[in-house]
Amino acid sequence: MLGVQKDIGSSEPVAGSANEPLANGGTPQTVGGEDAPAVLTPDNKEGGTAGLGAKPVTPSEPDPTGANNPYSPNFKFKVLDKELEFDEFLRGAVKDPETEKKVRELYEKAHGLESVKTDRTTLRNELAQTKEKIGQTDAALETIGNFVRQGDFDSFFEALRIPKENILKYALELVQREQDPNKRAQWEANRQAQQQTQYYQTQAQDLEQRQAQFSMQQKEFELSHVMTRPEISGIVQAYDAGMGQPGAFRQYVIRMGQALESGGHDVSTEQAVQEAVRHLQAVNPNLAVAPTGQQAAGNVVQPNQKPVIPNIQGRGTSPVRSTYRSLDDLRKLAKERTAMGE
């Protein structure tokens, strides 16, 4: 209210009415009437059609209702390839994308921590079992060492579970070898040959493992190179997006190559990729591979046409002009032209 009117219809001024100036220097609005002038207030210094003391909503301010930009929350999250959802009691607190992001991070950390705890418990149990086995082995070795130090070979052989027949056979061969130098030399040569063979076998196995590792790394590099080609990269992105897992196409190609090699065939990376694409096209015939080296028609530069050399009918003379060095040459030339009718 602008003031308390003492008497309706009275001509006396009312406190805060149009007959009294405002404190801020504006022109007051007359009570009643449709043609009343705008009120100049601290919130509406330029006037306007807003109510008295009301703050107008300008176009630059955001829409407080949010009707023009509706928000639909997503209550799902993933942890270790498992899709989960927010609890019911927390869904009401998700009012904007920022809150949704924070709640999702809390859930992912909480569920991730549970998986870490499970793995940690498993590793702790495995470590305890390994320590127990190592402790038992150390105790057995210590016992066997005490048998040797005490000279108790009967207990030593029993602990190692070596039959007495093998012990007697070894003792007999040892006596014969020590008594005959030739047998001893032959035994030494055979032993060295066996040791060298064992050494070379170990080196060959090590080399084979390194070659297999190098071949695997080379195939990984070739696969990465093939997947970046324009005619394959589109299929890679579509397959990964459809599976919802980055690297799904790579794993698919690897499984395809392993299946082909299981039949005893040596398959290259290019063949494995092409076979994988062929299987995908069999399932989805609309899947197309862009041809290699495809260019836009506007970017193709047509080669210039080669100049055409006109066919000049010769007269049996050299196109190179002759050099005349004497009168005889000139006379010869005159005779030739006379003979040709020139």
Image (cartoon, helix red, strand yellow):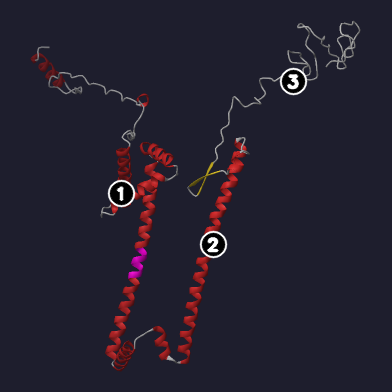
- In this rendering, the answer to whether 126 lies above or below 291 is below
Q: What amino acid type should be assigned to the residue bearing mark 3?
A: Lys
What residue does disc 2 label? 121
Badge nearest the viewer, 2 or 1:
2
* Magenta segment, prevailing SS (helix, strand or loop): helix
- Where residue 150 appears, as percent x and y from the top left, is 47, 91
Q: Earlier in the sequence, mark 3 or mark 1?
A: 3
- In this picture, which residue range is highlighted in magenta? 201-207
Asked which quadrant contains residue 211, the reply is bottom left
Q: Earlier in the sequence, mark 2 or mark 3?
A: 3
* Mark identifier at residue 55: 3
Residue type at mark 2?
Answer: Thr
- Sooner in the amino-acid sequence: mark 2 or mark 1: 2
Q: Amino acid at mark 1?
A: Ser
Question: Secondary structure beneath disc 2?
Answer: helix
Q: Is residue 40 above or below residue 134?
A: above
* Quadrant in the picture for residue 277: top left
| 255 to the left or right of 146 | left
